Amino acid sequence: MGNAYKNLGKDAEAAKCYIKAAALDIPFSDNTFGAYDHALGNLGLLQYIYSNDDIAIAYYTAALEKNPLHFDSIWNYSSALLRKHCSLEDVDLASAWEMYEYRFKRTTPSKIDTSIVRWDGISSGRSIVVLAEQGMGDKFMFGRYIHCLREYFAEIWVQCPVGMETIFSEYNTCQAIPDVECSIPICSLAGIFGISDDAWLVGMFSARKFAGDRLKIGIEWAGSDTHANNKYRSVDPSQFLPLVEFGDLYSIRPEAEAVRGVIALNACSWTESAEIVNGLDLIISVDTSIVHLAGSLGKECWMLQPLKETDFRWGNNSMGEKNIWYDSVKVIRNHGNWSNVFAEVRTRLELRKLEDWKDKMQSMIGDLNATSIA
């Protein structure tokens, strides 16, 4: 019942059910009593949703005291620790990344091909394949580390979805696993190599030319419908429409719904998407793969934080607009209200417009002075 309430967004009701399920005086079906690991883990998840990471960790710890092999709690514990790390808090980072590997043992595990032996992170060899996993954004984010494998392997293969081959054109690409010595899941690379090379795609793609001298703003209001948190990270496209006052609005996504006032570019490949992003002045997007593409290209991007359950990589509110993964991506924090988020976007665009005006005035003054001297 708690899970049903949580899926409906009724978190307070969900918490009541989880607390009751975790109570020591509620019997199991065999009439024994004791702590219930699933209920404790779910209480931790509810705290994580609202960035209460220390309280979440306390619940995960309690679940693991009851059942040390409660893999969901181990995985969720890692996410809480990593968000603390991404908020510049001191944590046992090695343990956090080690627990992150339990994503392959969860109730709904990340699926990869386990037939090829896993690289130990130390040994050198002839060949390795980097295994595709999780979302498109993860492939951009963790793709920064693949070059580090050159120190260990002469031949590097990258498994990637059809259409992403040009993103990883520096390497051999594949969908089926080739004949190689070992493998490594792409999201496991950060635990081996640490933070590095945020704008790793700079210079790899040309920039599309756009007509006119207005600010060119790329917008994205939704991610994949299959994403677990999509209903809280996506927003109605009408929220963006008032921003046309500050520039031309462009939608990049393929087959995007028609929105009045937004120019649909309908990018048909990641190469085209990269060229479009390179040609725009600014990207404003919800938390989806376009943010990671922009960050990897070093393009200015404002990421609109989800209503709740923010991904660990963006840190918590103590980080303000900053994050540790991309210098060019600024996070506009969401305190439970999309209207406030877009009010902040508007304020930033007004300030940008003012700065642009000042730059133009200074340039005109410089030209006048140069003419007077001549």
Image (cartoon, grey):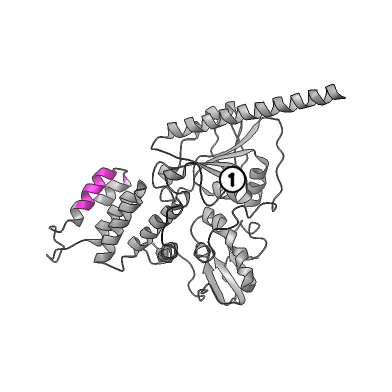
Q: Horizontal and vertical percent for residue 307?
A: 40, 41
373 w.r.t. 299: above or below: above
- Residue named by callout 1: 328
Q: Can residue 261 be seen from the camera position used here?
A: no
**Of residues 137 and 63, which is closer to you in this image?**
63
Q: Horizontal and vertical percent for residue 192?
A: 52, 66
Is the C terminus in the top left, top right, bottom left or bottom right quadrant? top right
Q: Which contiguous range is marked in magenta?
A: 8-19
Say whether residue 312 is left or right of residue 123: left
Q: Is residue 18 magenta?
A: yes
The quarter of the picture where residue 179 lies is bottom right
Q: Residue furthest front?
A: 373
Q: Main secondary structure of the magenta part?
A: helix
Q: Horizontal and vertical percent for residue 128?
A: 59, 72
**Residue at left offset 43%, top offset 44%:** 318
The quarter of the picture where residue 340 lies is top left
Say whether residue 122 is left or right of residue 29: right
Q: Is residue 242 magenta?
A: no
The quarter of the picture where residue 159 lies is bottom right
What type is the residue that disc 1 sits on?
A: Ser
Q: Residue furthest right?
A: 374
**Residue at left offset 70%, top offset 30%:** 213
Q: What is the tally of numbered marks visible in this picture?
A: 1
10 Å neighbourhood of mark 1: few (<14), some, or many (≥20)?
some
Q: Horizontal and vertical percent for residue 62?
A: 26, 61
Label 1 secondary element: loop
**Residue at left offset 72%, top offset 33%:** 211
Q: Can residue 316 be seen from the camera position used here?
A: yes
